[in-house]
Amino acid sequence: MDRRPAASTIERRTLLKGLGAASAGLIVGVYIAPARAERPGQAQSAQSDVMAAAGSQAGLFQPNAFVRIAPDSTVTVLIKHIEFGQGPYTGLATLVAEELDADWSQMRATSAPADVELYKNLAFGMQGTGGSTAMANSYEQMRKAGAAARALLIAAAAKSWSVPAGEISIEKGVLRHAGSGKSGTFGDFAEAAAKQPAPAEVMLKKPENFRLIGTQLTRLDTASKSSGKATYTIDVRKPDMLTVLIKHPPLFGATVKSFDDAAARKVKGLVDVKAIPQGVAVYAENFWAAKTARDALSITWDESKAETRSTKEILAALRSASAGAKTAVSRGAMPAGDGIKTVEAEYVFPYLAHAPMEPLDCVIEADENACTLWFGSQMQTIDQAAVAQILGLRPENVSIITLLAGGSFGRRATPSADIASEAAQAAKAFGKKRPLKILWTREDDITGGRYRPLYVHKIKGAVDGTGSIVGWSETIAGQSIVAGTPMAAMMKDGIDPTMVEGAEDLPYAIPHLKVDVHTVDVGVPVLWWRSVGHSATGFSTETFIDELLALAGKDPVQGRLDLLAEHPRHRAVLQEVARMAGWGDKVPEGRARGVAVHKSFNTYVAQIAEISVGSENAPRVHKVWCAVDCGLAVNPDIVRAQMEGGIGFGLGAALYSAITLDKGRVQQTNFDAFRGLRINEMPQIEVSVIRSAEAPSGVGEPGVPPIGPAVANAWAKLTGKRVRQLPFVGDAV
Amino acid sequence: MQITLKINGKPHKVEVEADTPLLWVIRDQLGLTGTKFGCGIAQCGACTVHIDGQATRSCVTAAADAAGMDIVTIEGLSGQIADEVQKAWIALDVPQCGYCQSGQIMSAVALLTSTPRPGDGEIDAAMSGNICRCATYVRIRQAIKDAAAKL
Ligand code: FES
Ligand code: FES
């Protein structure tokens, strides 16, 4: 937090007096970038982090880059994070509304344009969404934006009513002066507020004075998503627009050698066919014509540099990786000798597709001077730069309109800007000025790579004669997600942190801990997948600790608690979930329960799953209890929804999902073979959100890691069989 | 070939190929984009519409085969059942990314039309063809029950 001294003590005193010492919150400097239209010229851009005088545009009050107040009193918040289900439209608008003292019914949300200076993710330094950071990095920024707007509205009212600003209050969007009985709406003062000098600092509320944060508010995007009216990229329609489908190589790393489009060109509605670096692009008047023409292409591929191994061979390479290990953490030494019992386990995690419900898509309109893209951009700054480079434009001449996206789970956050680059290449190759809608089919999506990496985790554990767990030595082999990409700066001492997160920070008090990493090069493109490395480390650590506790004769909950003395937040969620489930109570005949606790993205989640043996010799999960500590829960119902969704997503993957390769060819092509969870497989879920005053942390991902191990631990209890390889169903790898 | 489709009560003359799926006529030619594309092979239910009252996957239904039938898309939903379903959806904040939800709602309305008081098993059976990658299933179940209770 910036503690720069007050530049405007008058306003500060007024504010303080107005609110009274008892209710005084936190005084903060207001360094909210102004709205673009009101910003000083390039020469003065150093001032851009200082609140500029607010201005008005057709009666619209734009106090800063994030808030717009219209004459009808609606407040629109420009959301710098993409909305693909995790709730940032609602969450960030809640923060603004809280400090603005707005009524929830007057709040609206829209996506912010691509503009790194104004809308960067404060955790990344560039505009983008991921790592469950949306709420954490916006928490103070959005509150300041709301508080700054509030101060201007009050100043305008004070002037108009000729009363001291400190005597004006706002409640549910109505400004009042008790002494004179005067009142007014935001709309009444929008125009005048635009002429007020910006405050240099404002006071943020104390948490005990929150009226909206922490309460149940209807999501701002629910109504449009319950009526078919929400607009996604696939729904964008422009005059003269063509649909583009791209035939991608059948092997990763293959390229187009030659193609014959004679048959494709006979398809009615086909406009053109062009080779682009990503494959062969088919331009047509509509989707069906594009698909029919694409199916009719005959392409010869150059496979000389392609990955041609099968999953079995790649797995063998990971298993046998021995040279060049890097050590992520090492303390103590593995005990040996009399009375020491050891266990070894090898875990195999398959490649996983994200399979967001809306396949990748992008609408682009480009000419020599500028370009606009409409799509679900998750990393606007990277997408903008990639498109600019392909089209020979300056990044600022590439506009991105970020639309709602039908899910991502990490898929839209590509360091290589894949869909945006493809759109730019398609536009460049086409050469004519017509809007293009690039669409992927489900087959393009499932076979298109950028999977959660295939991993092998080998763990050796030791328990001494007194039943204490005394050693834990782990080796992780897999591909790096960030090495060789624009995100390579994330590498630490030659280790991709996404491979070891959740393992190197094992919270249990075990004297010896060592985690080694083998990074193996494979020609299959990989990417972060909801909860990233935790999607694997959560499973291996939480099933292995369960196994060691069993070996030591300890209860899974109490045994964990005993090892977590230094980790109160882990303990609290574990105790809460045990309370909710009635851990230790008699479980119905034929059922068993398993537990797991895992911290990811600074959020702590514990889950207990109750299962029986279901069809396909796999668990039938009846019920899941979940306790989550994400710090202060801004929107508790969205937190619950993210836990429910994370559990369903993680459970589907653990039970059914795998991508496999046969001589380099992906064997799954659609939802028939790449299976996720369906409603008949969804357990009942009960979620408890821990009350906390800690800073808010993310919830989009942390619900995922514990579900697989909780179910596997229940399975071991029920059947005596430990699960070493995912998914449960099928012999994927 | 030219066919006439009756969609949301209105006739539309459209030019299609023999194999053009109804989904793409609805989306590309008629501009009704509430009906979504998710898989193209009748696996996900995102493209669900009602044909003569039956929940139908429009991605595998040739438009030509639907000529003359009563086709309803999410844009044309009406009546008490649809109202209660949509109200329940909003009250529970069912959608996350929202992309599957048109299809979910179309399936839910068809279910409640034929089975006004469905049990858990009936809900699961009727809705298992609709994938939600965000796994909003807990709330979908509850919303269907809440809507049923109002009918
Ligand atoms: S798009 Fe028709 S069922 Fe998936
Ligand atoms: S709400 Fe995202 S797929 Fe269902």
Image (spheres, rainbow, N blue to C red):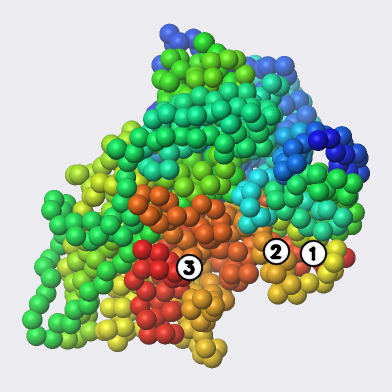
How many angstroms separate mark 3 from mark 2 (CA)?
Answer: 20 Å
Please identify the quarter of the rendering in which residue B131 is found: bottom right
Tell me which residue sits at (71%, 56%) in the image. B104
Q: Where is residue A670 drawn, in percent x and y?
A: 54, 53
Residue labelled with disc 2: B127
Residue A489, can we see it?
yes
Please give the chain letter of the residue carrying mark 3: A
How many angstroms separate mark 1 from mark 3 (CA)?
Answer: 28 Å
Q: Residues within 10 Å of mark 3 (few under 14, many from 20)?
A: many
Ligand 2: does it lie within 8 Å of the C-beta at label 2? no
In front of the other: A428 or A61: A428
**Which mark is on residue A178?**
none
On whether disc 1 and disc 3 are found on a single subunit, the reply is no
Tell me which residue sits at (72%, 26%) in the image. A70
Residue labelled with disc 1: B111
Please identify the quarter of the rendering in which residue A548 is found: bottom left
Marks 2 and 1: in contact by CB < 8 Å? yes
How many angstroms separate mark 1 from mark 2 (CA)?
Answer: 8 Å
In front of the other: A544 or A315: A315
Please identify the quarter of the rendering in which residue A67 is found: top right
Q: Where is residue A608 drawn, in percent x and y?
A: 48, 74
Q: Where is residue A335 drawn, in percent x and y?
A: 11, 74
**What is the three-letter code of the residue carrying label 2?**
Met
**Which mark is on residue A655?**
3
Left or right of A185 on screen, residue A684: left
In front of the other: A216 or A153: A216
**Sequence-earlier tag: 1 or 2:** 1
